[in-house]
Image (tube, rainbow, N blue to C red):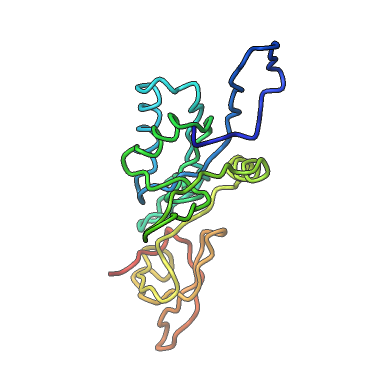
């Protein structure tokens, strides 16, 4: 077997003259995948674990995500989730030859995150030995996803041209100078009486042009 786990089961006993194989403690590993394929890879790993009868050793597959609120161009709000690590999934597994093959050969999987083993001869990249995430890293990641307040996202930035849809400045056109997602407001320069005047507006009062 090419993988060895340093964690042995302390409850496992061995009689004299009897050879036993220590159980491998499941650990969390980061797996790099093709961009935008995280959900597909998660479903495929779970399916392949069942097909190849290693579901007990591939215990969990997760895509860490945090809540977000996206402000559409018309000002309406869409509740969604944002990936904490785009291009990666986390797999809790007992690492051995079989489970490594199941995950590594899943479509759209690039490689495990780990330490690259140099090739003895020739050119090219060597084998990557998967390195488990530390308990501190895992705790921090899942604590962040559980406690993160929704992040407000808007498809507007300083320099964007906008038109005002409602309020006293309806039909005025201007340029965004500052965006405050936490307040759901932006500041824009509007031409009032021939002068550029900074005006604070609600997200749902404006529409992006172009």
Q: Which corner quadrant of the image does residue 123 belong to? A: bottom left
With 141 as the anchor, is 162 left or right in this view?
A: left
Instruction: Indicate the quadrant containing the C terminus: top left, top right, bottom left or bottom right.
Output: bottom left
Q: Is residue 1 above or below residue 151?
A: above
Q: Is residue 124 left or right of residue 200?
A: left
Comparing 167 with 197, the one in front is: 197
**Residue 184 in the image, given as x and y percentages of width and height:** 51, 59
The residue closer to the viewer here, 182 or 26, is 26
Farthest residue in the left direction? 210
Which quadrant would residue 143 be assigned to in this image? top right
Task: Give how far across and how far down residue 177 sits, in percent.
Answer: 47, 76
- Tell me where residue 126 appears, x and y as whole percent: 43, 53
Q: How many marks?
A: 0
Q: Residue at x 35, y 64 (%)?
A: 207
Looking at the picture, does residue 109 appear above or below residue 46?
below
Percent across and percent down for residue 17 are: 66, 12
Identify the residue at the far bottom of this view.
194
Give 129 or 80, whichever is nearer the viewer.
129
């Amino acid at each position: 077997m090419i993988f060895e786990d340093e964690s042995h089961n302390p409850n496992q006993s061995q009689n004299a003259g009897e050879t036993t194989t220590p159980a491998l403690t499941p650990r969390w590993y980061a797996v790099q995948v093709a961009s935008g394929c995280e959900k597909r890879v998660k479903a495929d790993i779970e399916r392949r674990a069942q097909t190849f009868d290693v579901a007990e050793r591939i215990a969990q597959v997760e895509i860490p995500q945090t809540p977000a609120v996206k402000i559409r161009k018309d000002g309406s709000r869409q509740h969604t989730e944002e990936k904490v690590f785009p291009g990666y999934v986390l797999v809790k597994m007992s690492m051995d030859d079989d489970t490594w093959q199941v995950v590594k050969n899943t479509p759209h999987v690039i490689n495990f995150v780990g330490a690259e083993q140099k090739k003895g001869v020739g050119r090219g990249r060597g084998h990557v030995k998967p390195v488990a995430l530390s308990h501190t890293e895992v705790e921090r990641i899942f604590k962040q996803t559980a406690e993160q307040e929704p992040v407000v996202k808007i498809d507007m930035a300083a320099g964007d041209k906008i038109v005002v849809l409602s309020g006293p400045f309806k039909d005025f056109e201007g340029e965004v100078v500052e965006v405050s997602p936490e307040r759901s407001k932006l500041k824009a320069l509007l031409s009032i009486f021939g002068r550029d005047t900074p005006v604070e507006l609600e997200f749902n009062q404006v529409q992006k042009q172009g």
